[in-house]
Amino acid sequence: MNVAFKPDETFRGDFTFRNTPEAIRRFPLPFPEDKYMYSVNIEAHRPGPLGSVVEFAIDVDEHYVAECRERALVLQEDPLRFQALPHMMSAQWDCLELIMESLARDYPQHFTLDRQGSQWAWTNRPLGIQQSFTFGDPATLPQQPLEYITRQVQGDWVVMDQREGDLWAEAGMVTTQADWSLNFDVGMSFKEWHGPVPLAHEMGVFDRALKYLLGLRLNEPVRRLNWTMTINPRLDTSPETYHRWGPDRATITPQNAGDKAHLRVELQGLWRLPRSNGIVFSVRGYLISMRELVTVPKWARRVHRVLRDLHPALVDYKGLTRYRDAVVEYLAPFDDGSPTSPGTAPE
Amino acid sequence: MSHADTIPVRVVAVEQVTPQIKHFKLAAVDGSRLPAFSGGSHIIVVMNDVGRVHRNPYSLLGVPAQLETYEIAVRRMEQSRGGSHFMHDSVSVGTTLEIAHPVNLFGLSKIGRKHILIAGGVGITPILGQMEDLHQDGVPYEIHYSVRAPEHAAFLSRLQQRAADRLKLYYDSSGHAIDFDGLLSTQPLGTHFYVCGPAGMIEVVLAKARAWGWPESHIHWEQFSAPPAGEAFDVHLAKSRVDVHVVPDQSLLESIEAAGVEVPYLCRGGVCGFCRTDVLELDGELIHNDHYLSDEERASGRVIMPCVSRARCKKLVLDL
Amino acid sequence: MLVTGIKSKPVYTPLAPDLSGRYHLMVGHGVGSEPLLRVLRDLRTAAPESGARTRVLFIGNPDEQAASGAQFRSAGAADVRLFGREDELLTDFQDVLTNSVMGTRLYVAGPESFMGLVMRSARQFNLNKDEVRAEECGPSARRVYCIHCQTATENVTTNIVQCKDCNRWLLVRDHYSSRLAAYMGVMVDAEAPGERPEVKEVFR
């Protein structure tokens, strides 16, 4: 799919981010039915339908250049959004290889990777980057390998070490998060960093997920979807900057919900890494305003019902408390009560 | 694991490195680079023997950064179910095989402050891979390699080149044995112990480590053992509606696979837990040969690890 | 975001000897002496020969140093070191860890803030949960890490606290980082500036 990039879109200030009709139709709706509760919901990350967000291992869409610029702005203000404990260097290189290989294979019009033994040459045409370096030698790149490459890809990346029957989040680039802090969480084990998630612990969701991930195999990545809502198309909704975006939550009315309230869906991918035997977890955020969402009638009805009936603990945890009712009121006129087909296809 | 995920390879070199060990180099049939891997990893080699398929795990002993070929070493087992005999007798330069992507159940601790690697006999193979990783990281380590006699020591030149005075050799024939008590009693905090060798050596190390107060999380071991043989028995797979006859020298897992049913697995050695299968009906007794289930689980008769365990029964129905 | 009942809050259990260990290193503060004395006595009963391999590092009331020392010794500790200040203890602790060998078990008892610093040092030596036991006793005042300006505020006993550096009012969450040895503090009135819950003493 050859998309035109919109390099000047903003995710702060004047919030000029918008989805084209094509972007709307390929939006990864996370609700296959009219209600929502946690599940492990992992599936094999194999190539999906043409044009979909899972057609390729790593998705590059119309917002690519703008998101890379936004990441650079976040890092300029707060370098602690990138973390890497000293023993994670091998894993950093694994991630660099994964991302470069994926992008060059699936978007050859934009990216080229030339490998001659350990001498690599990388070209990123949308960002105007050309870099020759020695794979394995950090001195030959302008930043640490994980930081270097994640500045050129959409989504957050968390790298885990596997040891003692557990997974430890010990490196990452996290600038588009839904309210968690890498700086605070780096060094935590799987259940520790998932600590704040309500209900799921009692349901055994994390025990099962951890066990599953410990056996994750090379060449067999998996994926799942997660979701929340964001006011304004703001990617950086970190605890660090909560004072900037927190107040927006109190400004929603049924009249402005269409433009300001956004469904935020995270496409999460998990890959086993070859040299470090670690796991990398990608969290790729997609945003859609309610106004854009309701252009797909089935989705309007579905999302209205999901939000209206959501478990109170989830409303609270996902930060929807102040504006959920206003959004539901905005969506209500689009829901005539007619059935929705199972699955997420627009119809 | 699905069989579609294997990589076709061709044997590009074979060398007899000790009287019982052969060294094989494998390259991708399509000439592509093989997948990168971590030290301690193994691959499952799928061998199409006459009337039977062998799937044996072999450690990758080569330099992880060199991906034109994979290197494995196979010891000819006297009592073999056929896999090692096949590798020794039927495989030569040009033979094609299938291999699975590397799996690592014997990796180094990345936060270890010192690593003691113990190898007995052909157990040197994963240690070689780990040594390469340690060489990269520059963390202190020692290798203690015990063999029956000097002619049974394999890959000495590369061990000596990389490890130099970190390597100590022990020959049974000289009456020279590894002083495990000495090693285990004097290590700084953060040391990790890795042992790969015969079952007896591993048992001794585990017992002594416990006696010296080491927690299990700092002891890592890998054992290459064929699934124990046993009497033939029959099993019914409820979901697949298939009856399987398990012969004495084929494991339950292998028999199920031969019947066309796939079971998830990782190690095929009773350690990792991935082939854990529920028992729906049992008239008889299960013979548990694994290192994974708890005593309660074994006693319950409700679960079995088909890669190494068997049964003596009139009826056995599995949830497969 | 402002959810309570978080599972990442550390859970402490009453100390008991870990007989699978060979060397027993005990670090305590104030009323943490009680659990440590109990471990020493239980250890002496269960494994009398282990006494030679026990060591105590302790900060107590300066007036009671001699008495504390005597108590630990009579309970069976082979080596007892007493300190007046946390930083002195932590420095010596680093030395002890450098010279300790595998087979060591660490027992920590005292206020959580103190224990957090001890366990952070222990982690640097790759002592993991199999080798460390901790019992919380004494004041449960928290060290709070302001997520906005990365400053730690000590001795927090209230549900909300003003960050000593950036002055934001922070909700003291139960989400805990062992690396930072602190609980997360996040702005409590971001969504409705000035609207704060009543300040209450909750961590005593």
Image (spheres, rainbow, N blue to C red):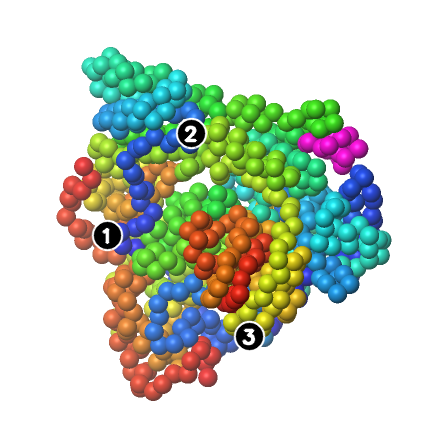
Image location (x, y in percent) of residue C129: 41, 38
Q: Are marks 3 and 2 in contact (CB under 8 Å)?
A: no
Q: Which mark is residue B241?
A: 3
**Tag 2: amino acid:** Gly
**Tag 1: amino acid:** Asp
Q: In which quadrant is the N terminus of chain B drawn?
A: bottom right
Element on which disc 1 rests: loop
* Residue plotted at (63% across, 70% down): B260
Extent of the magenta region: B145-163
Q: Residue A298: in sight, yes or no?
A: yes
Left or right of C174 in this view: A89: right
Task: Tell which subunit mark 3 falls on.
Answer: B
For this orientation, the residue located farthest to the right is B93
Left or right of C162 in this view: B15: right
Q: Marks 1 and 2: which is nearer the front?
A: 2
Identify whether A233 is placed above or below B268: below
Which residue is identified by label 1?
C189
